[in-house]
Image (cartoon, rainbow, N blue to C red):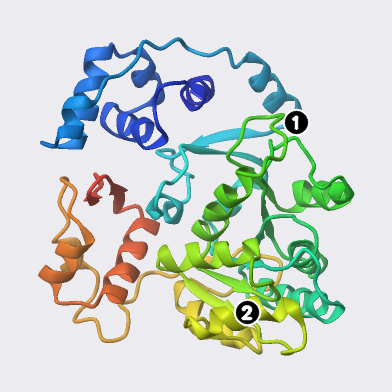
Amino acid sequence: MQKDWLQLAQLKGLTLPAKRELVRVLGSPGAVLGADRDTLTGVLRAAAGESGAARAVKVPKMTRPNVDADLAVLERIGAAYIGFVDADFPPLLNRINTPPLGLFVLGERALLMSPQLAVVGSRSPTPAGRRTTSQFAAELCGTGLTITSGMARGIDCSAHRGCLDAGGHTVAVVATGIDVVYPRANRDLYRDIVERGLIVSEYPPGSPPRREYFPQRNRIISGLSLGTLVVEAGIRSGSLITAKLAGEQGREVFAVPGSIHVAVSRGCHHLLRQGAKLVETAEDVLEEIGQYFTAQSPGRAAAPVGAPPPPGAPGALPPLYDLIDYAPVSMDQLIEQSGLTADQVSYILMELELNGLIAAAAGGYQRLPR
């Protein structure tokens, strides 16, 4: 199965959404690789509907790529690849725009399913910004949250290190192959995260850092997380991209205010003007996302909540669940049919996914066999 996933991931001529749709319909990467071109074309045309784009769908002749070298690297370092239909692929990540086909993971892979908070910011923070980040990371991981960041210089490193020093769990989503340490100054941090956390990558082993990988990586940082906290960021910072993606994904966005005389405060102030929640203490974060998980003692991963209805929801989860069939139903339809708000429906859908009752699909959400 690992080989099939890697071959499909590196297969030329199919877009990422097309590969996901083919796996969803045919059931596995092996089934996609073994299907004939007419079958693949028929699936993709059916997904495109009755538009002109459907008639234009044409699957090119494809040859399975040789991934033996990648498999050897994964075996040597103890890493693995998790496909998007695998049981331990994080359901929150399947809900974003253009989710990945799968993830390379190295370390404690169970952390993918833990409630996470993204903490990001400037690569050139102030000393106060570093201290604030470490303090927030330590306090929040003490509640059971996993702290997720990108292992870049500056705020990212402070978030990872503050969490590890407090005995918590951290996830680093890197913009390289999972076996590549970037920047090289982070060798010790990389080693510590492998031992006590998790390294995640979308890219094959050996992939060097490339400019286009970083914004692509940011959608995974925010997509894994219940919310994104920005501590310090310039007005053109990549952290603002992560925060923007978090907002588009329906996740919470938090920002720490700073001095008006410091350039790395401007990005946070911009986010606050755009509606981000102003954060002064860890409790400010927990007020918004604490309902999504049950806090545990420091150093232990938190557990998802059992699924109480959100404030104001008429009844518990079963009424909304009853509206979801084995054929995909859109979120707009669920809002209209249930009479709930968009926030309430989004919250309940997340709970149903975390409990393995539904799954995101092309066109909306569908019920899973029980």
Q: CA distance from mark 1 to mark 2?
A: 38 Å
Residue at 52% over, 65% down:
303
Q: Residues within 10 Å of mark 2 (few under 14, many from 20)?
A: many
Counting from the top left corner in percent of width and height, residue 32 is at 35, 21
Question: Depth check: 281 or 13 in front?
Answer: 13
Question: Depth check: 179 or 219 in front?
Answer: 219
| Above or below, 363 relative to 305 | above
Label for residue 268? 2
Label 1 SS: helix
Query: Does residue 370 appear to the left or right of 204 in the view shown?
Result: left
Count the labels in the image. 2
Tag 2: amino acid:
Cys
Q: Earlier in the sequence, mark 1 or mark 2?
A: 1
On the image, numbered disc 1 is attached to which residue?
Answer: 77
Label 2 SS: helix
Residue at 67% over, 34% down:
79
